[in-house]
Amino acid sequence: MFIRSKEMELPFRMEYTANTPLGIGLLLTVFALSVPATSTVLQAKQTLIVPDPIETIQSAINQAGEGDTIVVKVGEYHEALWIDKPLSLMGEGVDAVTIWTINQQGSALTVSGCQSVEISNLTFACHEEKDPNQGLNPVVHFEHCQARMSGCKVANSPGRGILIDNISEITLRNCTLESSGAHGIEIEGEGTIARLETNVVRGSGEWGAYCHGRARVYLVENIFEENNYDGIGSKGEGTNLTMQGNICRNNYHAGIAIMDGSQAEVVENVCLENAVGGIQVSGDQAQAWLHRNRCCSNKGSGVAFNNRSAGEAVGNVCEDNSDCGIIVADDRTNAYLSENQCCSNKIYGIAFQQQASGQALGNICENNQKDGLMIHQSQTEIMVQNNRCQENTGYGIYCFRGGLAIISGNVCNQNAKGGICVRDKKSNVKVSDNVSNNNGNSGITFLSGAEGVIEKNQCDANGSMGIRIGSASTKVKVNSNRCFLNQNSGIYYYENAGGVLENNTCRENRASGIRLAGAGRITARENICAENQHIGILVEQQGGLATIIDNQCTANELQGIMFMNGAKGKVVGNQCDANRYNGIVASENGTVVEVIHNVCRSNNRNGILFYEGSEGQVCMNVCERNRFEGIVIRGSGTRVNLIENECRQNYPSGILFHQGATGNIEKNICEAHPWSGIAIRGKGTNPVLTANQCKGNDCWGIIYWAEATPVIEKDNIVEGNGIEGIKQRGRFVLKQDKTKQKHLTF
């Protein structure tokens, strides 16, 4: 994985700097000093004037001695100049002096085999029409020389405007290169060093500047525009560029392209409205360090790393591009992305795809028309940390089709589709410590077989669920998350999804705290599900066993825990208090539940309720101070065994079987109720009562109606009740004192 070292430098820069952070100032100063100053080396011994008294420029060059100055007066000259000695060639004005050549006769200017040449204030042009054939002579050619050109114009080349090659050291400043048939300027060859500063290169048939063959090039504050390919291009191992403050706009390919083994440091450049992209890094071993560039309104991506390239992009602004802000693509492509601003792009803010790898740290990805940050088919884990992905039309972060990632510490708020989404088989992602609030759909979603861990996230006030797990995502661990105030459930599992939910807090959601609907094998442990508008934990149409252990389900608007529609599972050690309806509920045919060691207190109806044909075991629970019965088993076909439960101070009874329910009532303690410990009523209601303790109730220990047919064993203890131990009646009148009667009707 590409991780930037604090001391990482371009290989060639180490020869010129003392490990400065970017090395640009010192690097350019050292290069400038490598060419002797005019005052010390190019001392004019004499000044030669063209065309009077010397008729041609080439004649003046031939006559000049080393260090002489040639001044060219206003006019047009038709020559092919050759300079092979130190001298200065000056025009009276770039728009006043033009040197024309016919391409077959050679370049308008060739500087070869010499040092300390100064060229200024001249226009060099070619009579022939443009032809992209690179075999044509350039208008200006520097070979094996040291020279400076300033204030000049190079125009109308049928091939290249300027060629610098063969171990040359050239400075080009304040020049204009336009309408070349091929490259505006080509720089090539090992040992060739060029500095381009404040030039304008426009309208080239191919690249504005093309650097290759191990050349070293420094480009500062130039403008490259309307070129038919890239504004600046580099290619080949050993080719090294440093670029700062350039403007690359309206080129017909990329603004800047680093290709096939070349390396570049690209700082504070502007790449606008290019036809394919702003900055492209492409090809095996191509590397680029991109800092504080502005890549906006390009028809492709703002920045692209692809085809096995590598590098880093730090502090760039990539906005309003037709594709992505930054894209990292293809096998063995690796990029470190930090503190970039990727907003309002037509597709993604940042994209890793097709087995690319890297890191995305501290970026801003907002208002993109698809997702803020996308990961597709990553080969190694991509670190996605501390990014801000908000207000995107798709997801804040989207990982799919085999994406591997660690998604941590991100802020994903107010996205239209959702905060974070992971989907498809082979996607395995750890999602932790993120804030994913106020999204149009769910805060975090895992779908279609995705696997991973969701922990310590905040998912509040989303348009649907806080966390949603579905479509056979069977190995997802969800722990220590906060899901508050969502428009649907806090956490939702469905379509055979499975996993472990642990230590989550789900409060004040518009539906349930946790909902398991048609899910696979799931364990929900030590969660807090409180004050939700429906149910604390809802299990329905379960495909696998649901185990609900040690949760707190309190003060919900309906039930604390509910199993329904054929769900199966265990409910163990939960606290279900102060719910508006019941503490624990099992409903409908096919629902089978074991309810063990739970505490159900102060619910507005029952502590535990089984009805409509559900079945199960209810063992060793505590049901106290519920507004109605502690445990209710109701309805024909409902078959439940109650064993060793403790029911106290419920109203009116501790346990009620009615409407044809059946089962065993064994070794329960039913005390201190205003009516009875156990009540049995309704035709066909026939539980077996064994060894229960029904003591200290205000009226009866056990009461049953005539239409019910319970079996009441002799080992039940029914002492110390207000009226009598066991009673078979229909309507009762209890005299409480001499002046007042209380009517009790069941």
Image (tube, helix red, strand yellow):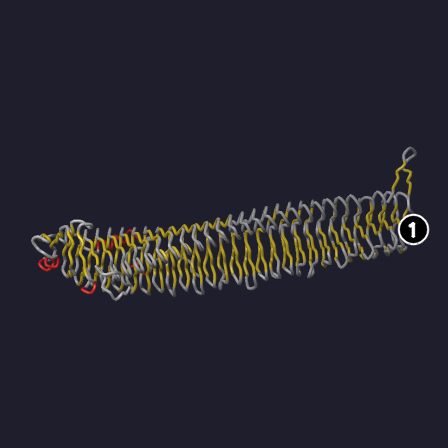
Label 1: few (<14), some (14–19) or many (≥20) C-alpha neighbours in 10 Å: some
Q: How many marks?
A: 1
* Res 666 seen here: no
Q: Is residue 97 above or below residue 698?
A: below
Residue at image location 13% in from the left, 51% down from the top:
73
**Where, by quadrant of the figure, is residue 626 drawn?**
top right
Q: Nearer the viewer, residue 340 or 8?
A: 340
Q: Quadrant of the C terminus?
A: top right
Whether residue 469 is visible:
yes
Give residue 481's position: percent from left, percent from top.
59, 51
The residue that label 1 is drawn on is 706
Residue 570 image point, x, y percent: 72, 57
SS at mark 1? loop
Between 105 and 711, which is closer to the camera in this rendering?
Answer: 105
Q: Residue extending furthest top?
A: 739
Residue situated in front as seen by the camera: 728 or 220: 220
Which residue is at a point 63% across and 60% down the rendered structure image?
497
In the rendered image of this protein, does residue 723 appear above or below residue 186? above
Instruction: Check the image and report above or below for 127 versus 600.
Output: below
615 left or right, relative to 176: right
In this view, the residue farthest toward the bottom is 135
**Residue 370 picture location, percent across and down:** 50, 53
Image quarter of the N terminus: bottom left
Q: Position of residue 609 (x, y in %)?
A: 77, 51
Does residue 581 appear left or right of residue 275 in this picture? right
Kindly identify the amino acid type of the residue bearing the numbered disc 1: Ala
